[in-house]
């Protein structure tokens, strides 16, 4: 085919044009593949998280909702399911008898029936002190208290030990005057819906005061102990041990008894 004058002019003109360099498309694709998947901002998820946070802040501003959200309080190994703790003590019901009675001779009690408290692990104080992995102090108040009438030690395994000390009412051996629980780690105790919850301290250690009737269940494997005294409870933690003092005392009286442990 003969080349026309137009074709020749176009060929000569094209030879004088400067073409841009061919881009390295394959190199760019390989670099992106080697860098892994690109992380893109998940705006929808971020917006959802912000919305949830705002909702929580709004709900926490409502007293009723805040009380419901904070209804589980933990002190040591004890979980208390109750309304929000009260920061200052409430007026308590006076004890039917003084906590620190005068040092008068203790009446000779009638035989104590352990069947009143069908707990496993009935033992003596000396045996419990030899077996427990922690010391077992006794309160020196009230002055006429003396040693416990009943002692129980319960063990599911070495790290979960419960010691229960019970002092009976000298005038009525069918009723407990005072009980003291010593709970080691890995033991779970639950207290449900006491009437009043007050944060307090015992010798500078954190504590909680609970008033009113409530069910109490202590579990560690197959261990189960229920409330012994129908009254109030002082709970505090010291040296890794959780103490529960059940009595019909006031907060001030119970705190003095707790601080007298030796």
Image (tube, rainbow, N blue to C red):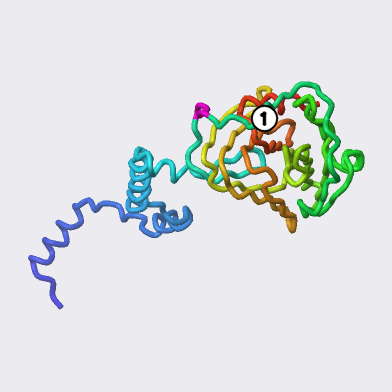
Q: Is residue 99 above or below residue 177?
A: above
Provide the residue span drawn in magenta. 87-91
- Rendered image quadrant of residue 74: top right
- Rendered image quadrant of residue 7: bottom left
Residue 167, position as x, y percentages in the image: 78, 38
Residue 165, position as x, y percentages in the image: 79, 40
Q: Is residue 157 visible in this depiction of the protein? A: no
Q: Residues within 10 Å of mark 1 (few under 14, many from 20)?
A: few
Q: Residue at x 47, y 53 (%)?
A: 35
Give the residue number, with chain letter if any, for mark 1.
97
- Rendered image quadrant of residue 197: top right
Q: Residue at x 35, y 38 (%)?
A: 61
> Which of the image's four quarters has the C terminus?
top right
| Residue placed most toward the observer, 115 or 36 | 115
Q: Is residue 142 above or below residue 223?
A: above
Left or right: 89 with respect to 242? left
| Residue placed most toward the observer, 143 or 126 | 143
> Which of the image's four quarters has the N terminus?
bottom left
Residue 147, position as x, y percentages in the image: 84, 34
Give the number of callouts.
1
Residue 17, position as x, y percentages in the image: 19, 52
Q: Residue at x 68, y 50 (%)?
A: 226
| Residue placed most toward the observer, 123 or 14 | 123
């Amino acid at each position: 085919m003969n080349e026309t004058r137009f074709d020749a002019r176009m060929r000569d003109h094209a030879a004088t044009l400067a073409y841009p360099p061919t881009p390295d498309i394959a190199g760019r694709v390989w670099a992106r593949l080697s860098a892994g998947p690109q992380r893109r901002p998940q705006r929808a998820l971020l917006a959802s998280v912000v919305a949830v946070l705002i909702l929580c802040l709004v709900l926490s501003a409502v007293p009723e909702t805040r009380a419901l959200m904070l209804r589980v309080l933990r002190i040591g190994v004890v979980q208390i399911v109750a309304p929000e703790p009260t920061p200052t003590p409430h007026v308590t019901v006076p004890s039917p008898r003084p906590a620190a009675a005068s040092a008068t001779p203790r009446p000779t009690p009638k035989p104590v029936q352990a069947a009143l408290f069908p707990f496993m692990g009935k033992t003596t104080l000396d045996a419990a002190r030899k077996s427990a992995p922690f010391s077992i102090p006794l309160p020196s108040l009230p002055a006429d208290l003396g040693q416990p009438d009943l002692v129980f030690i319960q063990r599911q395994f070495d790290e979960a030990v419960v010691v229960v000390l019970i002092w009976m009412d000298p005038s009525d051996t069918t009723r407990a005057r005072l009980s003291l629980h010593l709970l080691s780690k890995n033991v779970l105790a639950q207290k449900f819906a006491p009437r009043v919850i007050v944060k307090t301290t015992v010798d500078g250690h954190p504590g909680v005061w609970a008033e009113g009737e409530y069910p109490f269940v202590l579990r560690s494997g197959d261990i189960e102990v229920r409330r012994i005294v129908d009254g109030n409870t002082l709970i505090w933690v010291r040296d890794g041990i959780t103490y529960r003092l059940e009595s019909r005392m006031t907060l001030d009286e119970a705190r003095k008894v707790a601080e007298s442990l030796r």
